[in-house]
Amino acid sequence: MEIKIIRAKPNQMKAKPEDESKLGFGKIFTDHIFTMQYHSDRGWYDAMIEPYRPLSLDPTAMCLHYGQEIFEGLKAYRGKNNALFLFRPDRNIKRMNNSADRLCMPRIDPDLFMEALKKLVLIDKDWVPRSRGASLYIRPTMIATEAALGVHSANAYIFFIVIGPVGPYYPQGFSPTSLYVDEDYVRAVRGGIGYIKAAGNYAASLLASKLAAEKGFTQVLWLDAIERRYIEEVGTSNIFFLVGNELITPPLTGSILPGVTRDSVIQMARRWNIAVSERPISIDELMDASAKGTLKEAFASGTAAIVSPIGEIFYKGKATAISGGGIGALTEKLYNEILQIQYGEKDDPFGWRVPLSD
Ligand SMILES: *Cc1c(COP(=O)(O)O)cnc(C)c1O
């Protein structure tokens, strides 16, 4: 399918933000949007890049009632000499199709998806920030648009991609987070939809996050839904622990989102000959390791922050400091290495970087 391009007219174009240090996250969007329609009778059609616009939906559009809504999150980076890169976009495309399968939504042709990503970023390439650490966030989304109130998988969908500049995650340098181990609420359960980026997962996580924030914590540390013992994720990120010389992250058993950053951390650490285990780790094992002094570092991983150091974990009324409440050496090394690959400052032995050119 051809992607039709309708360029925004000068009077439809927005002023670009002047101060990149004030971009924040997810508030500013560019001049164009990619859209593509689906109907079960004809498959995908009308792929186009057009001026950024609101969507028009019937009030009974099924996404508004039964939650067929999936999304992705990735970034474009500007390196030296204005070179632009995507980071492992093939992984996001694959994951979006896995999400579509789980919610009975239509798959998207990976080549067309990739072409849409590249063309959209290139049309709005002047919006990709110039300061190191800032980037262009990319949000592919699919929603059910069929107007009907019976519960069934919809026969009509729209797939769209919006993009917008975002600031560096750590404008003032790394700041370690404090986590609250929630014993009342769970994020996801095996057999459910925790392993896909579906909107409902985030709605379900808000209350626990709010309660943790009210208690003064940065994020929720999620335990498994069945035994309430095994560590799963932190907020909307994956989690890693350095215990002794073993880097541990929970295995992908169905309730954990398979993060692209998680996979990158695993591959990079293995390349450095660090023993990486994808295995269950219980909160008790973690507390024991801390008591014995073998818990050296903990960090969250995700596209937004790359890695985010964890300085403290609060469980059953007790606070446990990690890395003395500071930042572990491995955490910092992983952050720097992945960032340098993303911005084209270092060799890319893994072939993760996808250069963009007109
Ligand atoms: C997006 C997300 C992650 C991180 O995935 P990345 O691909 O590394 O950005 C982890 N957990 C949850 C729940 C997520 O939504």
Image: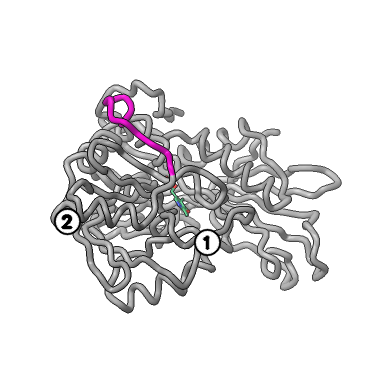
Q: Quadrant of the N terminus?
A: top right
Give coordinates of residue 5: x percent, y percent. 60, 41
- Residue indicated by mark 2: 172
Q: Nearer the viewer, mark 1 or mark 2?
A: 1
Give coordinates of residue 253: x percent, y percent. 54, 45
Magenta span covers which residues? 269-279
Q: Secondary structure at mark 1?
A: loop
Amino acid carrying mark 1 in the image: Ala
Q: Residues within 10 Å of mark 1 (few under 14, many from 20)?
A: some
Residue at 67%, 40% (x, y): give it: 108
Residue at 30%, 63% (x, y): give it: 179
Q: What is the residue that sits farthest to the right in this orientation?
A: 41
Give coordinates of residue 266: x percent, y percent. 37, 34
Q: Secondary structure at mark 2?
A: loop
Question: Pointer 1 and pointer 2: residues touching (CB < 8 Å)?
Answer: no
Q: Is residue 76 above or below residue 344?
A: below
- Residue 343 sits in which quadrant? top left
Residue 14 colored magenta? Answer: no
* Disc 1 residue: CB within 8 Å of ligand 1: no
Amino acid carrying mark 2 in the image: Gln
Q: Residues within 10 Å of mark 2 (few under 14, many from 20)?
A: few
Numbered label attached to residue 170: none
- Residue indicated by mark 1: 225
Q: Determine whether, in the image, residue 47 is placed left or right of residue 284.
A: right
Give coordinates of residue 65: x percent, y percent. 70, 70
